[in-house]
Amino acid sequence: MSAHASPQTSRPSRPAIPILLAVLAILLTALSTPAAASTAAKPTVVLVHGAFADASSWNKVAARLQGAGYPVIAPANPLRDLAGDSAYLSSIVSTIDGPVVLVGHSYGGAVISNAATGHPNVKALVFIAAFAPEEAESALDLTGKFPGSQLPTSLITRQYPLPGGGTGTDAYIDPAAFRAAFAADLPARDTALMAATQRPAALAALGSPSGPPAWKTIPSWYLVAGADQAIPPAAQRFMAGRADAHTSEVRDASHVIMISRPDATTAVITAAARATR
């Protein structure tokens, strides 16, 4: 009888189901932790333009913020009077769920400081070469507080009809002076277009006294434009210090620092946004 080796049988390998389930459970737990949730939930950034500009002045900054995952709104600032402009912005904030970072450039700084009042979801104010008035101060008051602004000698005015009768006065920057006074670090071909399409501001808006400022109760950030010929840098440093704001400066930047230095501007806004978490 010949000897034959008896075949050895082996059980088919089975996936390590318990291990896979354990790994899946760990991943699901990590995704549901508060840290992961807070990373996904970013505050809405509201960008408010100032006088002689419009919402498109924020385009470079808005694109960067959106690329970083922030919801962005850049409304049209009416530029008619401070109380009315602030009420309009306040109405926009009222429609936003979750935390908000309000960002203002130039006259827009006065608007955000007034509009934030009564909105507990406004977690930070960011002033970009902007007015941060004390109660009863106006943009015109602060412009004249320190020497160096070219605006007083660069403005031209036009009358416009008021809805209830009578006339108001709009201020424009003379196109011949626009680049030097407003945007000296941008190419002349760009500033010629900006001058042609500028949004005028009513003198009533620039001369309106501020209400109680929100920067007294809301954490603030300030970016100083060190070569600004519209709001003197000394005035900006004064306002930033008075507001106890987190302050940074770009020494050679003009008044439209958000256009000429969008990376530096975005960095300040995102620093404020991260501090809201």
Image (cartoon, rainbow, N blue to C red):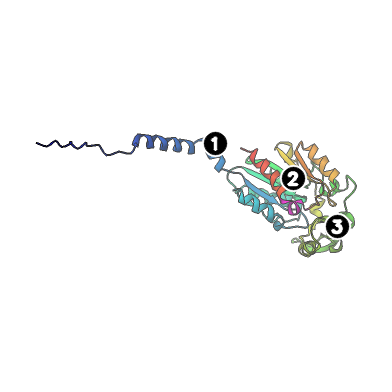
Mark 3–mark 2 Cα distance, whole angstroms, equals: 22 Å
Q: Which residue is mark 2?
A: 127
Q: Which mark is residue 35?
A: 1
Confirm whether residue 17 shows in the render.
yes
Viewer-nearest residue: 79 or 84: 79
Furthest residue in direction left, as rendered: 1
Mark 1–mark 3 Cα distance, whole angstroms, equals: 48 Å
Magenta-drawn segment:
256-262
Among the two numbered marks 1 and 3 on one chain, the one whose residue lies closer to the N terminus:
1
Query: Which x, y percent locates residue 184?
Result: 83, 56
Q: Quadrant of the N terminus?
A: top left
Q: Secondary structure at mark 1?
A: helix
Mark 3 Cα-neighbour bin, 10 Å: few <14, some 14–19, many ≥20: many
Q: Which mark is residue 272?
A: none
Q: Is residue 146 left or right of residue 268?
A: right
Viewer-nearest residue: 138 or 125: 125
Mark 1 Cα-neighbour bin, 10 Å: few <14, some 14–19, many ≥20: few
Q: Is residue 48 above or below residue 31?
A: below
Amino acid, disc 3: Ala
The secondary structure that dominates the magenta segment is: helix
Amino acid, disc 2: Phe
Mark 2–mark 1 Cα distance, whole angstroms, equals: 29 Å
